[in-house]
Image: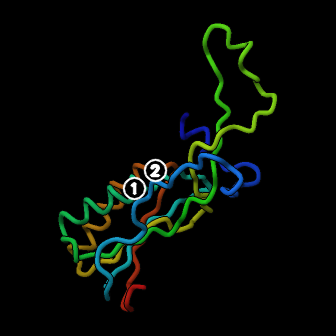
Amino acid sequence: MHGANYREGNGQVFTRKQYIKGKPQIKIAKFQGGKRGTYQYCVQLSLNEKIQIRHMAIESTRLAANKTLEKTTGETGYYSRLRIYPHNMLRENKQIATAGADRISEGMRRAWGKATSLGARVRAGQCIMELYVNGNDHLVAAKKALKGACVKLPGTPTITVMDWNKPSP
């Protein structure tokens, strides 16, 4: 299964996990990292197009950004937060590709498919991840961390820097 098959969110989403046996587990370990506090800057990662992101891509983006930023600022020098949650269940109608498969496989008849993954639908311009940092050297490190992390995401990202003088939530 390729992520490109599920990049565009067409049709109505399916989120009813109570009706499905063998639901996929969410791969995102933490939605917040670092230390809460008062920070000077907020660096946001957002996408420029309407797209659907799988939960494995969200987790790898979070890991890449946090690991890069933790090397330069330490564990207590930043605060990160994911702003999206993968609610949508993605299904796949697997086809059998062996000898005699035409007698076993149903083809497109009753092609509901098994739940294989979870995804989050993102609007154009929606914020995916935020990093809160203090000081200009930490700001450069946060931009570099998000630039390296956005490689893991589909679509074209934008990194925005905002002055942030109030306590982070």
The residue closer to the viewer here, 149 or 63, is: 63
Q: Quadrant of residue 146?
A: bottom left
* Disc 1 element: helix
* Disc 2 element: helix
Residue 78 percent across, percent down from the top left: 28, 75
From this view, report whether residue 36 is shown above or below residue 23.
below
Q: Quadrant of residue 61?
A: bottom left
Q: Residue furthest bottom?
A: 166
Q: How many marks?
A: 2
Q: Which mark is residue 125?
A: none
Residue 4 percent across, percent down from the top left: 57, 39
Tell me the residue at 81%/28% (across/down).
Answer: 109
Horizontal side of 129 relative to 15 (left or right) equals left
Which quarter shows the C terminus? bottom left
Which quarter shows the N terminus? top right
Three-letter amino acid code at the position of disc 1:
Thr
Please tell me how crowded label 2 is: few (under 14), some (14-19), or many (20+) other residues with Cα within 10 Å: many
The answer to whether the residue labelled 2 contacts the one labelled 1, judged by CB atoms less than 8 Å apart, is yes
Q: Quadrant of residue 44?
A: bottom left
Tell me the residue at 64%/29% (across/down).
Answer: 94
Tell me the residue at 63%/20% (across/down).
Answer: 96
Tell me the residue at 55%/49% (across/down).
Answer: 24
Three-letter amino acid code at the position of disc 2:
Ala
Query: Label 2 to label 1, Cα distance in Å?
Result: 6 Å
Q: Which mark is residue 57?
A: 2
From this view, report whether residue 123 is shown above or below residue 131.
above
Please tell me how crowded label 1 is: few (under 14), some (14-19), or many (20+) other residues with Cα within 10 Å: many
Residue 161 percent across, percent down from the top left: 39, 74
Residue 51 percent across, percent down from the top left: 60, 53
Q: Residue furthest right?
A: 109
Q: Residue furthest top?
A: 99
Q: Which mark is residue 61?
A: 1
